[in-house]
Amino acid sequence: MSRTILITDIDTPLGFDLSKTFLEQGDRVVGTVTAPDKESNFKALNSSSFTLRRWQRSSSISAKNLLLSIVNDFNNLDEALLLQPPSLPAKLLHEVTTAEIEQGVDCWIKGNLFLLKEILELFNRSGNGVLAMINYSPHDSTGILPPLESALRGSFQALAKSLFSSYSRENLYINGFESNTVQSSDFADFIQQTLRDRGRRVSGRWFRFQAKSGLFSPFRIASFNRLS
């Protein structure tokens, strides 16, 4: 039976590859973009099972309308994949403008909270759901990120850990994925395979994809692990 899956930021290489991978598995995919002029870039995903939606990350109303449209069109949402893909200019903190800080916070902190609130409300009403929090930084080969991006990604990881704990007693499956591989298609395949094999029965784990060794190496945040 096909599932309805929300995938954010399909105007990024990983978002596009995830959409393609899940469509190939027979799922219904709702993909989000931020700008209407990007909609013509997704002809390769042309499928009766693919729906494109606009989502303004900085708007709580946009997040609410996105989830309402999914419920109206498909009656429910089975899974949601939330990407954290900001690639910001490599600036020292004193070089970052106030506008850049405000935009980063609006898009990558407030935006995530707005959408997650709506997703979790829907999952709680339906009594089940699968959420994947995906931290992807293909340009990070040293482990040292620019200050603003580091703050945004750190917030995302801390938020995921909190969700692992605070929803551990609910019938929800929340896991995290991260990688810095430049091959987004490999990471997309890993995410799809892990969700299929483990992500719909375990919760509270980070799964790390390491392309250098060619190995899939899941690791657990022990203090927030949920027994399955």
Image (cartoon, rainbow, N blue to C red):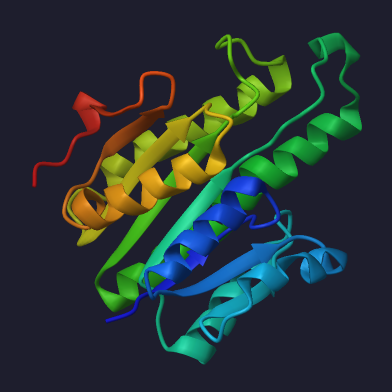
Above or below: residue 132 compared with residue 37: above
Would you say residue 225 is visible in this rendering? yes
- Residue 98 appears at what percent x and percent y? 89, 28
Query: In the visual, does 8 lie left or right of 92?
Result: left
Going 67% across and 73% down the picture, which residue do you hit?
53
Outermost residue toward the left in this view: 228
The front one of 114 and 134 is 134
Q: Position of residue 163 (x, y in %)?
A: 35, 44
The answer to whether residue 214 is above or below residue 105 is above
**Position of residue 129 measured from the top left corner of the image (x, y, whole percent):** 31, 66
Count of numbered badges drawn on the protein: 0
**204 vs 220: above or below:** below
On screen, residue 22 above or below 191: below
Left/right of residue 25 with respect to residue 91 in the rendered view: left
Quick check: can you spot residue 61?
no
- The x, y position of residue 211, in whole percent, is 43, 26
Nearest the camera: 171 or 26?
26
Q: Quarter holding the N terminus?
A: bottom left
Q: Residue at x 30, y 51 (%)?
A: 193
Q: Nearer the viewer, residue 23 or 200?
A: 23
Where residue 43 sits, quadrant-wise, is bottom right
- The residue lying at 51 percent from left, 82 percent from top is 49
Identity of the residue drawn at 76% across and 60% down: 34
